[in-house]
Image (tube, rainbow, N blue to C red):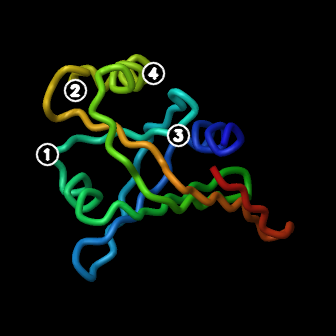
């Protein structure tokens, strides 16, 4: 999982895919942190993406960096504790203008049963699970 985290952090932007009914939805994200041995992302509960994740928590993210790409498929689990929210916001202080660890909007989610696949045009795909 540490290699997945480093790749996403260095790529800076990844794309999160969710489903809304029968329509796929994809949008750029940038938040990623490891907390208590789990890979977390962050959003706001008031956003459509949060509602889509709560309706169907199976998601996939994709990032590209240096001619390689990473896809991570798994289930996102909401963690309403203050500690992981504070950890995420401390790692991304610019978000503190919009979010607080104690508000009812800040949402952090961790990956459960995740499969990460590293790919490129020159090497065979390599998969890790966490």
Find residue 95 and report its image quarter: top left
Distance between mark 2 and mark 1 Cα atoms: 12 Å
Going by the image, does 64 lie left or right of 107? right
Distance between mark 3 and mark 1 Cα atoms: 22 Å
Q: Nearer the viewer, residue 102 or 120?
A: 102
Distance between mark 2 and mark 3 Cα atoms: 20 Å
Residue receiving disc 3: 39
Query: Measured along the vertical axis of the image, is residue 66 above or below residue 59?
Result: above
Residue receiving disc 1: 46
Question: How far from the left and from the top, in percent, is residue 45?
Answer: 19, 44
Residue at the image point whose x is 18% and y is 50% from the top = 47
Q: Are marks 2 and 1 in contact (CB under 8 Å)?
A: no
Residue at the image point whose x is 27% and y is 82% from the top = 22
Distance between mark 4 and mark 3 Cα atoms: 14 Å
Between disc 4 and disc 3, whose residue precedes? 3
Between disc 1 and disc 4, whose residue precedes? 1
Between disc 3 and disc 1, whose residue precedes? 3
Residue at the image point whose x is 56% and y is 56% from the top = 114
| Element assignment for label 1 | loop
Q: How crowded is the residue under tag 4: few (<14 C-alpha within 10 Å), some, or many (20+)?
A: few
Going by the image, does 124 lie left or right of 88? right
Query: Measured along the vertical axis of the image, is residue 33 above or below residue 120?
Result: above
Between disc 2 and disc 1, whose residue precedes? 1
Q: How crowded is the residue under tag 3: few (<14 C-alpha within 10 Å), some, or many (20+)?
A: many
Distance between mark 4 and mark 2 Cα atoms: 13 Å
């Amino acid at each position: 999982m540490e290699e997945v985290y480093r790749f996403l952090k260095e790529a800076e932007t990844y794309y999160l895919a969710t489903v809304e009914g029968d329509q796929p939805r994809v949008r750029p994200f940038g938040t990623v942190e490891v907390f208590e041995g789990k890979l977390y992302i962050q959003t706001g509960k008031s956003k459509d993406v949060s509602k889509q994740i709560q309706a169907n928590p199976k998601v996939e993210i994709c990032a590209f960096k240096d001619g390689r790409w990473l896809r991570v498929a798994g289930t996102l689990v909401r963690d309403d504790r203050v500690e992981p929210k504070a950890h995420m916001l401390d790692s991304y202080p610019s978000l503190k203008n919009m979010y607080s660890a104690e508000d009812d909007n800040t949402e952090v989610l961790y990956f459960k049963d995740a499969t990460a696949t590293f790919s490129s045009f020159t090497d065979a795909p390599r998969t890790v699970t966490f």
